[in-house]
Amino acid sequence: MPQPRSERFDASATGGTSGMGPLEASAMTGHHLELSYGKDPVIHGVSISLEPGRVTALVGPNGSGKSTLLRSLAKLHPINNGHVVLGAGENERAASLLSARDFAREVTLFAQSRPAPQGLTVREVVAFGRHPYRRRFAGLSADDRTAIDHAMHSTGVADMGERAVGELSGGEVQRVWLAACIAQGTGVVLLDEPTNHLDLRYQVESLDLVRDLADEHGVAVGIVLHDLDHAAYIADTLLLLSAGHIHAAGTPIEVLTSANISEVYEIPVEVTVDLRTNRLRIDPVGRHSARAGATSVPSTQHPARKANS
């Protein structure tokens, strides 16, 4: 299991990679947030802190409030009580007082569902990420083009820059929008289930890219994930939500225990540490769990060879 990362990246000390300058490190804190849908409360006095150079993952079952909490940080869900601030100390400022353009220069949101714009190329959609920095009717600057190129290479969409987005698969569109978020170049990045609709390779590459944002650029990352293995793989800090409350918070190995997961998800779960990779392994125990082990194919006998023997 990777150990929690305690390093802090000094954005002024070095340049970025792939022609992109260092992102300005920032921080975001939600204090005692209470959220609702109509008269129905969904988040009850939850506090959350996103720190520069660290990934904070929100996990929990459907309906636990994790996506709603993330949307409130992005100013997309009204806050009944509590408040959100950016920065810390003398640089602290209320998110509610920032204009939409100023907020977009500091915070990026990767939402769950985004459309596939018709009539636009991949590169044109990635360029949406530079909108907060552009003057009305102005063309792209050299900095804009550099940020766009870096984002497209980082997400593996550089080779499809001139393709129409409407012709892409759901997973490819997901990566294009992720590139647009990276091109925005903010110090806080919020991601709501960014691995949805991606095949295995791009799930891993997307998670690695999120880790790079924290490790190489000092970005404060908040991410909602359904997959607990993904959360253990990527996060420095985990918040396990249940019915709008924080059930547990801490490092992955502190939060993702058999007791915590079993209680919140209401299913028996076995949690072990893989001795080869030193990573957590989370195995829900269903009615047919024993059958999975009994029917597994020995590593020395491929099923096709067995059928033909």
Image (spheres, rainbow, N blue to C red):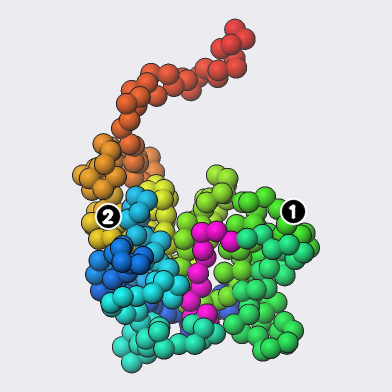
Q: Which residue is mark 1?
A: 167
Q: Identify the residue at image location x=37%, y=88%.
A: 93
Q: Which residue is mark 2?
A: 242
Crowdedness near tag 2: few (<14), some (14–19) or many (≥20) residues, C-alpha within 10 Å: many
Location of residue 221 in the rendering, given as x and y in whole percent from the top left corner: 43, 68
Q: Can residue 275 be seen at all in this image of the molecule?
A: no
Location of residue 25 in the rendering, given as x and y in whole percent from the top left corner: 44, 79
The image shows residue 110, relative to residue 137, as above or below, that is above
**Dot 2 amino acid type:** Ser
Q: Identify the residue at image location x=67%, y=79%.
A: 144
Give the side of residue 46 with respect to residue 167, left or right: left
Give the side of residue 58 with respect to residue 178, left or right: left
Q: What secondary structure is found at the residue carrying circle 2?
A: strand
Sequence-wise, the earlier of marks 2 and 1 is 1
**Dot 1 amino acid type:** Glu
Q: What secondary structure is found at the residue carrying circle 1?
A: helix
Q: Identify the residue at image location x=46%, y=19%.
A: 298
Crowdedness near tag 1: few (<14), some (14–19) or many (≥20) residues, C-alpha within 10 Å: some
Location of residue 10 in the rendering, given as x and y in whole percent from the top left corner: 43, 79
Q: Depth check: give the residue in front, 172 or 255.
A: 172
Location of residue 48 in the rendering, given as x and y in whole percent from the top left corner: 30, 70
Q: Residue furthest bottom?
A: 90
Q: Quadrant of residue 215?
A: bottom left
Quadrant of the drawing holding the C terminus: top right
**Magenta span includes 112:** yes
Q: Identify the residue at image location x=35%, y=54%.
A: 63
Part of the protein shown in magenta: 104-114
Q: Quadrant of residue 73?
A: bottom left
**Magenta span includes 173:** no
How far apart are the two marked residues, 2 and 1, measured between alpha carbons? 39 Å
Q: Can residue 166 be seen at all in this image of the molecule?
A: yes
Q: Which label was assigned to residue 69? A: none
